[in-house]
């Protein structure tokens, strides 16, 4: 196994040399490649199953760069004038920021025909970014520690979770949903209205503190504690992590709270002035086709954007999850992060 | 004999200085410039915001307290360890060396995961304490300041042990024994002879450990999450999630200025101590 | 005529405790790498090699390992030369600002890696450096240098330079005097600098995060990618492999020249 990459590289070199000898035009064709920036957690699936069929069909090589959304945004900002990335995949609230800074360019059905077939609600700002899948956000819990499951969001405020919750810091996107839940529990208003009741949300969030084992900023730390059972639950985790791990035999599950689940859309967009625009459009299109959309449901347990894909049991369609006002979130989150540091995680 | 005002040896610093000027100087200049750039022009608003806010000042103090505690712990235990190594037989010395070098090759994330298993409520440490009756219910060891200082000190300990050990080995053992033979009690001989001679190693270790702690990001993020505020985490947040690079740059400049001042002052104080001892 | 030292038992008790604290998490990690469970957990009596297989076949793992080793070796070599020369100058030169220069050369350690990474990546953009390995190598030298300068300064403080003069009066050329007298005496410092420097580069995450690209990925970045995909024991297998490699390296040094002479003196 040790020589595997070397052999692959040798093979690659051999093919490249043969191609160069055969015809110069082939070299140019070979050189067509695009760089796609996206979440590190999806790197395996992207490289093994999503990218190879695209490369075979289009002849365009795809390099996948896995980073946190915040780091991808930082790279886009640094490379503003001469981007290396052609396509970027990030959380919706970070996409919004990139859009506002003119770092993205809109896709249209002319270059991305599948846009005409996916659910219209998946297309944001006239194609500036597309919600290619929607993970569901709810409470992750250890099934050995909480065998009966968790019925509602309100339950994690209860005494049986004292010192046993790993709660995400406000810098992690799902925390804004916990804030909305807190506001809902404090005011009794539905999520749609509660999401704007920020003060009530912070007041209620303060009451969860005795139950907190730790406020985490590194997701893996919280996930490990949850899987080992030291933490009983993580309020606000997403389906792609929880249900994928459950399918691997890890004793965790994602609840379906009576108050409702949240949507945490994964978005994809074309980079403004990015290289190989037509290749980039073809790749975005590929991400929306039925076979790839089916992968999101069967492998990541996220809700697909294509109505032609039967998501299967246990996966809520995106319109049955509550999708927050990301414009409002994106504008206010910096202030919320500072407030969270002072009032909750202090 | 050549009498020059500046020893020509000084020119040996030129390549390193030039390298730093190009590779570090420019980024730092960009950072400094960004720290003065406010929403509507140029000014000290970011600095005023950080230094004028009791919460932010608290974060600075917490960072310094954290760094001081870790440095102190490392200095005391690292010195003891290095001293034991220096006095051990060749075989034991090799084993002690391996025990301090091996942990450095395991990434902080993985080591933290290992500690988590040891320190959790039903882990071996709590079980042992319960079994011997030292405690009645499991201690909470994760996500506490004690855990943070303990964890950081244990991760950075090699950075104190090896510099101290390197200078301890340069002291001829006769010098140590000579003092004892001349009648000084062992402890007195140690304080009067060995300690001053090894001071350069201690200064090196202190400077390295202090600098690494004050700027640590991964370690406190893993050990205390968001519970314990450090300047380094605030800076990362400013750049990556609050989208206020000016604020982050200003905090970075403040951190660098304080850390450099402390390291220089400590170095100067130790040098004076070394001369008078 | 040695006197019994009442502190000796205490000294050894504390040392033993430190050894236990240093080794305990490593034992856990090694055990976890053989766990027959998808969770990062010790599973007593239920072992498997599946995470070792997963590591060996994981895409990009060996490439990342090789890249990080190359990067660390290169940046450590450059920093050793530049840093030792600078330490010599600061120690012997007695020029104005020597202490300040010493602190400046230490300063990369005091800056959070994220700040350094963002600032350096912007600079490379400005200089037009687009090759990720070049960018990584150039900036890793900055991270390695503080260790070299600080440790060599302390080693030089105890080095008796009259020994070099003595060797020269005995007929050695300046070069061979340095090689025969200075290098062996400074060897502990040089080796310690190299070890710290190599690890600083090999384990660097926060700065490299902004400099890597899809083609050029260092081991810490690759490991975090594994972890983000699934927090399973694969990383425990990677760490155990690194432990074994390090132990073998130490053994080879020990055999080749005697650990005492090479690492210790």
Image: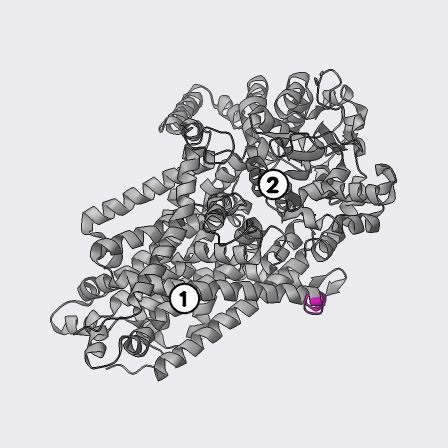
Tell me: residue A116, above or below residue A200. Answer: above
Q: Principal SS element in the magenta part? A: helix
Q: Quadrant of the N terminus of chain C?
A: bottom left
Percent across and percent down for residue C186 are 26, 63
SS category of the residue bearing label 1: helix
SS category of the residue bearing label 2: loop
- Please rate how many residues cluster around mark 2, counting C-alpha atoms within 10 Å: few if below 14, some from 14 to 19, many from 20: many
The range drawn in magenta is B44-54
| Number of marks present in the image shown | 2
Residue at 45 percent across and 36 percent down: it is C42
Residue placed under numbered mark 2 in the picture: A231
* Magenta stretch contains residue A163: no
Tag 2 subunit? A
**Label 2 to label 1: alpha-carbon separation:** 35 Å
Q: For the residues tagged 2 and 1, is the chain the same?
A: no
Task: Indicate left or right for A134 with B155 as reference.
Answer: right
* Front-lying residue, B247 or B14: B247
Residue C126 visible (yes or no): no
Q: In the picture, residue A36 is in which quadrant?
A: top right
Residue placed under numbered mark 1 in the picture: B76
Percent across and percent down for residue B52 are 71, 69
* Front-lying residue, A110 or C61: C61
Percent across and percent down for residue A22 are 43, 19
Q: Tell me the mark number nearer the camera, choosing from 2 and 1.
A: 2
Tag 1 subunit? B
Task: Indicate left or right for A40 with B95 as reference.
Answer: right
Residue at 53 percent across and 55 percent down: it is B147
Q: Quadrant of the C terminus of chain C?
A: bottom left
- Please rate how many residues cluster around mark 1, counting C-alpha atoms within 10 Å: few if below 14, some from 14 to 19, many from 20: some
* Front-lying residue, A215 or C83: A215
């Amino acid at each position: 196994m040790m020589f595997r990459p070397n052999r692959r590289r040798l093979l690659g070199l051999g093919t490249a040399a043969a191609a160069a000898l055969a015809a110069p035009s082939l070299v140019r064709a070979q050189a067509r490649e695009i760089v796609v920036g996206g979440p590190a957690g999806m790197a395996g699936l992207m490289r093994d199953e999503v990218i190879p069929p695209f490369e075979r069909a289009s002849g365009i090589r795809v390099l996948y760069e896995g980073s946190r959304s915040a780091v991808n945004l930082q790279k886009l900002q640094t490379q503003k004038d001469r981007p290396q990335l052609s396509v970027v995949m990030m959380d919706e609230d970070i996409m919004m920021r990139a859009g506002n800074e003119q770092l993205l360019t809109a896709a249209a059905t002319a270059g991305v025909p599948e846009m005409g077939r996916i659910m219209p609600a998946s297309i944001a700002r006239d194609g500036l970014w597309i919600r290619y899948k929607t993970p569901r956000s709810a409470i992750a819990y250890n099934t050995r520690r909480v065998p009966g499951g968790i019925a509602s969001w309100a339950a994690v405020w209860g005494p049986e979770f004292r010192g046993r919750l790993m709660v995400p810091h406000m810098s992690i996107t799902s925390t804004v949903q916990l804030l909305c839940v807190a506001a809902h529990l404090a005011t009794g208003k539905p999520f749609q209205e509660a999401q704007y009741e920020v003060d009530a949300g912070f007041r209620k969030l303060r009451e969860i503190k005795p139950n907190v084992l730790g406020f985490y900023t590194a997701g893996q730390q919280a996930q490990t504690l949850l899987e080992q059972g030291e933490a009983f639950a993580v309020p606000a985790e997403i389906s792609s992590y929880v249900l994928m791990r459950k399918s691997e035999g890890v004793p965790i599950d994602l609840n379906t709270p009576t108050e409702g689940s949240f949507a945490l859309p994964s978005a994809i967009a074309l980079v403004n002035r990015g290289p190989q625009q037509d290749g980039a459009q073809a790749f975005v299109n590929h991400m929306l086709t039925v076979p790839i959309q089916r992968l999101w449901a069967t492998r990541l347990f996220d809700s697909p954007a294509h109505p032609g894909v039967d998501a299967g049991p246990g996966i809520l369609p995106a319109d049955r999850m509550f999708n927050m006002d990301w414009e409002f979130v994106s504008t206010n989150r910096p202030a919320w992060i500072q407030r969270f540091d002072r009032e909750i995680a202090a | 004999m050549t009498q020059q005002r500046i020893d020509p040896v000084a020119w040996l610093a030129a390549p390193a200085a030039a390298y730093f000027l190009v590779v570090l100087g420019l980024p730092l200049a960009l950072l400094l410039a960004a720290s003065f750039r406010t929403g509507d022009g140029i000014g000290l608003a970011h600095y005023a915001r950080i230094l004028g806010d009791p919460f932010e000042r608290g974060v600075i103090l917490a960072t310094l307290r954290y760094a001081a505690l870790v440095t102190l712990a490392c200095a005391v235990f690292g010195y003891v360890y290095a001293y034991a190594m220096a006095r051990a037989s060749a075989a034991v010395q090799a084993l002690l060396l391996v025990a301090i070098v091996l942990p450095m090759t395991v990434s902080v994330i993985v080591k933290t995961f290992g500690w988590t298993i040891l320190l959790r409520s039903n882990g071996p440490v709590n079980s042992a304490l319960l079994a011997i009756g030292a405690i009645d219910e499991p201690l909470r060891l994760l996500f506490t300041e004690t855990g943070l200082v303990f964890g950081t000190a244990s991760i950075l300990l090699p950075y104190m042990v090896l510099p101290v050990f390197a200078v301890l080995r340069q002291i001829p053992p006769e010098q140590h024994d000579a003092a004892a033979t001349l009648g000084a009690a062992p402890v007195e001989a140690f304080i009067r002879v060995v300690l001053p001679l090894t001071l350069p190693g201690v200064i090196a270790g202190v400077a390295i450990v202090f600098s690494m702690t004050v700027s640590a990001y991964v370690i406190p993020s893993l050990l205390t999450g968001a519970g314990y505020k450090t300047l380094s985490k605030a800076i990362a947040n400013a750049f990556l999630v609050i989208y206020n690079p000016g604020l982050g740059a200003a905090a970075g400049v403040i951190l660098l200025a304080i850390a450099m001042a402390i390291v220089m002052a400590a170095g100067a104080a130790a040098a004076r101590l070394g001369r008078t001892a | 005529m040695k006197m019994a030292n009442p502190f000796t038992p205490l000294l050894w008790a504390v040392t033993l405790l430190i050894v236990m604290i240093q080794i305990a998490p490593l034992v856990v990690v090694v055990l976890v790498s053989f766990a027959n469970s998808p969770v990062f957990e010790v599973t007593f009596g239920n072992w498997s090699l599946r995470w070792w297989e997963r590591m060996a076949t994981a895409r990009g793992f060996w490439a990342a390992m090789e890249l990080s080793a190359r990067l660390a070796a290169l940046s450590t070599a450059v920093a050793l030369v530049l840093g030792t020369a600078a330490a010599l100058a600061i120690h012997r030169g007695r020029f104005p600002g020597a202490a300040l220069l010493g602190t400046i050369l230490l300063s990369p350690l005091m800056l959070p890696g994220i700040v350094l990474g963002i600032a350096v990546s912007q600079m490379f953009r400005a200089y037009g450096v687009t090759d990720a390995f070049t960018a990584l190598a150039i900036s890793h030298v900055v991270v390695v240098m503080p260790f070299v300068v600080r440790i060599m300064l302390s080693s030089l403080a105890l080095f008796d330079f009259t020994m070099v003069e003595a060797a020269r009066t005995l007929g050695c050329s300046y070069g061979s005097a340095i090689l025969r007298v200075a290098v062996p005496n400074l060897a502990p410092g040089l080796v310690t600098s190299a070890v710290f420097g190599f690890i600083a580069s090999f384990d660097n995450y926060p700065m490299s995060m902004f400099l890597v690209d899809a083609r050029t990925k260092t081991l810490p970045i690759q490991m975090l990618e594994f972890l983000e995909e699934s927090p399973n024991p694969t990383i425990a297998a990677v760490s155990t492999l690194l432990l074994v490699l390090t132990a073998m390296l130490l053994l080879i040094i020990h055999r080749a020249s005697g650990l005492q002479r090479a690492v210790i003196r």
